[in-house]
Image: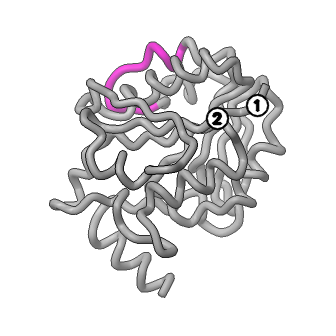
Amino acid sequence: MAVAVLLPAAGASRRMRGRDKLLEVVRGRALLRERAEVALTISADVLVTLPPGGGPRAAVLGGLPVARREVAQAAEGMAASLRAGADWARGQGVKGLMVLLPDMPDLRQEDLKSVLQAYDENTILRATSEDGRPGHPVIFPAALLPGMAALSGDEGARALLSCHAVTLCPLPGERALTDLDTPEDWAAWRARNP
């Protein structure tokens, strides 16, 4: 058994004011595709949740050996993707599910490997910035997948994180925190990463 990876990509990018953050070009390709490629370097079991109809996000994943699941309740928020991911991961028989937010372009393959190596299969593992601020990715043990499958709303997995033990895994700099949600976030990031 392995750790599976969930890329929750069913959201609407509302704060991008008409642009889709997951289609922004990073390292020569759409961010969603680039993040899926990185995920595939650490796990053969990768699920990408998509909005109803899939649209351009599904198109940029063409040819990649990732599972895809359209989320009918995508408008509800993050919990809809987490439920879909938990149901899928339970069917895969994995020992944990890594939630890798696809709008975090600074996370590298070596960061994901560090998180995997620190995972003990029993406790939630959460990446942090170098100075200890909680970020992503987060690995949930298989025993918590039923609880994840019952989440609702746009709070993500906060309920699980608040009532279960969490082991922290510091990553270099602020790579575990860099989350690009607005055109201004993207402009600032591009200025730092020419």
Crowding at dot 1, Cα within 10 Å, few <14 / some 14-19 / many 20+, comes out as some
Instruction: Name the spot of residue 110 as percent of width and height, x first.
Output: 75, 60
Specify which label sits upstream in the sequence, 2 or 1.
1
Instruction: Name the spot of residue 1 as percent of width and height, x first.
Output: 79, 25
Which quadrant would residue 188 be assigned to in this image? Answer: bottom left
Q: Residue 34 carries which label?
A: none
Query: Residue shown at 27%/58% (left/top)?
Result: 20
Instruction: Name the spot of residue 47 as percent of width and height, x first.
Output: 52, 35
Q: Nearer the viewer, residue 86 or 167?
A: 86
Disc 2 target residue: 45
Q: What element carries label 1?
A: loop
Q: What element carries label 2?
A: loop
Residue 28 included in the magenta stretch of the image = no
Instruction: Say left or right for 74 vs 2.
Output: left
- The stretch of residues the image draws in magenta is 147-156
How far apart marks 2 and 1 lie (CA) works out to 8 Å
Query: Residue shown at 48%/16% (left/top)?
Result: 149
Q: Nearer the viewer, residue 131 or 49?
A: 49
Instruction: Name the spot of residue 113 as percent of width and height, x first.
Output: 77, 51
Q: In this view, does 90 lie above or below 185?
A: above
Q: Which amino acid does label 1 sit on?
A: Ala
Disc 1 target residue: 2
Report the magenta stretch's main SS. loop
Instruction: Say left or right for 52 vs 5.
Output: left
Instruction: Say left or right for 122 vs 69.
Output: right
